[in-house]
Image: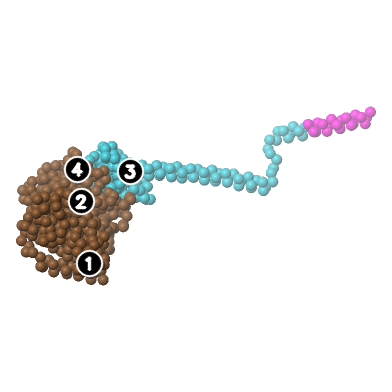
Chain colours: A brown, B cyan
Amino acid sequence: MLRFKWFFALLLAVVLQAVQAPTARALTIDIYGPGQRQVNVCLLAPVAVSAKPGAAPHLPDGAERLENLMRQDLSFLPFIKLMASSDILGSTSGATAKEIDFHALTLAQADLAVSTSWIDEGRDMGSLELRLFETFSGRRILGKAYANVQQEQLPLIADRFCSLVMQALTGKSAFFTSRLAYVKEVGHSKEIYTVGPQGRGQLRVTRLGGKNLSPAWSFDGRKLAFTVLTPLGHRLGIWDRATGRIDRKNLNCNTVISPAFLPDGHIAVALDLAGRTSIYLLSDTYEPSTALTSSRAIDVSPSFSSDGAKMAFASGRYGSPLIFLLDMKTKEVRRVTFKGKYNTSPSMSPDGRFIAYSSMLPEGHRIFVHDLATGRDTQVSFGPGNDEEPAFGPDGYFIAFSSSRSGVYQLYLTTRHGDAARRIPVEGPAFSPAWGDVDQLLVRGQ
Amino acid sequence: MKMKFLGLLTLCLLFALGSAGCAKKEVQSQPEPQPAYQEQVDQDQAAQEEQQQAEQQLQEAELARQREFEASLIELGTMVHFDFDKSELKPSARDILQRKADILKQYPDVTMVIEGYCDDRGTQEYNLALGERRARASYEFLVLLGVAPERLSIVSYGEENPIDPAQNETAWALNRRDQFRISY
């Protein structure tokens, strides 16, 4: 029944989308530009509308919760500055363009306004309409309706709508619908978990005991690969999201380190087949098939662009670990980082232009982003403590990393421009974030 | 009177005889012959004592061997340490491993897992590989000294399970190590 209601809500949303105002965008944000602008957004007070004429409408219990959830979500976008209602002189409510006092909003320098109207149908929470307006022109950029809203759907609704807001402004929407895998310390063991990038909907993946490390998503978000550290040696762990099953493969190697998926679903992993740890491609049956790197030193941490043409990795071939790039077609390897003596944990942006990595400075590890087009390295994290293990988001804009700045390792978010780091609220020590382009609805719906 | 003289003579004779008998007895230092069964019991006791003594000696030898074995096991567990981001064996580590090789040759039933560890200044994935190199350095040295490779295995823990989680040079130096897990 719930599923039917949800389907109905989606259908209604699609219909509303079809009849909304023309989508010519006056206000856009180039999140990849060198100096992104910040837009002021005002969340208007929710309005109650009665479905029956003449009846006095009431706001449902969850109205305030939805506002807080949207506020939380939007606060993760560095290009959005959320305004307080006290910033605006005059009325800050209304649902439609006719009801909203755009003059007051523009005077307060609000660029965008989000209106929330609850349709009181006399039972449950009723239905919900969310709209995004550009204040200067009064034009509606976005309109969404959700029928028969349930309390437990509020986080999803907030995520979905904010995802559309991001899409409308930047052309990218993956942030709110993506999912992070990470390692969490549970007693003496380390287990794999997944969580939304805003810290919502935490799910435990493994209960294997021991140390489970370095999770990596497949590009389709269906699988996670990770290292299982046992007293008998390393094993390759594979989690299938659809079945929840975990396979532990014995590759008969001393090291099974830093597994990473290629876009075609194959796995590259660092093994010590020839007496030294190099990166190998695994076959469909998880047998080592091709050596992707070969040196007398340590080669680890492969990371692929979404077209599979490039692989970044860390190698100690020049005495200490540095970042290198492998052209998958020509097999040509070139050195990427020339600054720093200990550069590890590369993560390639999906478009293959940027590599985020961790560099050891005298004051601790910091995250840098290397632009392959210009050859420039930009520091994007500033401690204190150690900032390690960066992971590019599917939008190529956000970067998740682990940091000991609070005394224990926790997960943080920044962008490739080095915006102020924001902690992802998960409990306990957390490490090794890995970003997957996974629809949260599918994961939470399991 | 004649009767008195005879009686005195007899007494003297008897006395003389008695004295002579006593002197003879003194000369004979041999013990009086014992009954047969008593002799058997004495023999058994002696054998038992001898056996007990032998057993005790054996037990003591066994205990000594056990003690020596335990001391050897403790010595086999001695860790070797490394410099930052390095997996080369230092001279002190080579001495420790030489001793381990001798012990392993003495006790052919003992097998050993060599665990490689790093301090947590580096990053995890690279450290997992470095831990393997450190364990492999000990492994290869022991094999070179004649220990059968099938008696040795390698597990790298990277920067997991530090001995001292503190953030100072003393703790880091302790954590950059090979640890040896013994089975027999």
Instruction: Mark 4 vs mark 3: tell me if same chain.
Output: no
Mark 2 or mark 1, earlier in chain: 1
Q: Regarding mark 2 in the picture, which secondary structure is present there?
A: loop
Residue that numbered label 3 is attached to: B100
Residue B33 visible in the picture: yes
Residue A262 appears in which quarter of the rendering?
bottom left
Residue A257 visible in the picture: no
Looking at the image, do the residues carrying marks 2 and 1 touch, with CB atoms under 8 Å apart?
Answer: no
Residue B42 appears in which quarter of the rendering?
top right
Residue that numbered label 4 is attached to: A383
Mark 4 or mark 1, earlier in chain: 1
Q: Amino acid at mark 4?
A: Gly
Instruction: Mark 3 vs mark 2: tell me if same chain.
Output: no
Most distant residue in the right direction = B1
Residue that numbered label 2 is attached to: A277
* CA neighbours of label 3 inside 10 A, class few (<14), some (14 to 19), many (20+): many
Position in image of residue B146 (x %, y %):
29, 46
Residue B6 belongs to magenta span: yes
The majority secondary structure of the magenta stretch comes to helix
Instruction: Mark 2 vs mark 1: tell me if same chain.
Output: yes
Q: Regarding mark 3 in the picture, which secondary structure is present there?
A: helix
Q: Amino acid at mark 2?
A: Thr
Magenta extent: B1-19
* CA neighbours of label 2 inside 10 A, class few (<14), some (14 to 19), many (20+): many
Looking at the image, do the residues carrying marks 3 and 2 touch, with CB atoms under 8 Å apart?
Answer: no
Determine the residue positioned at 84% across, 30% down.
B12
Determine the residue positioned at 11% across, 42% down.
A339
In 3D space, how far apart are the residues under numbered discs 4 and 1 (Cα atoms)?
57 Å
* CA neighbours of label 4 inside 10 A, class few (<14), some (14 to 19), many (20+): some
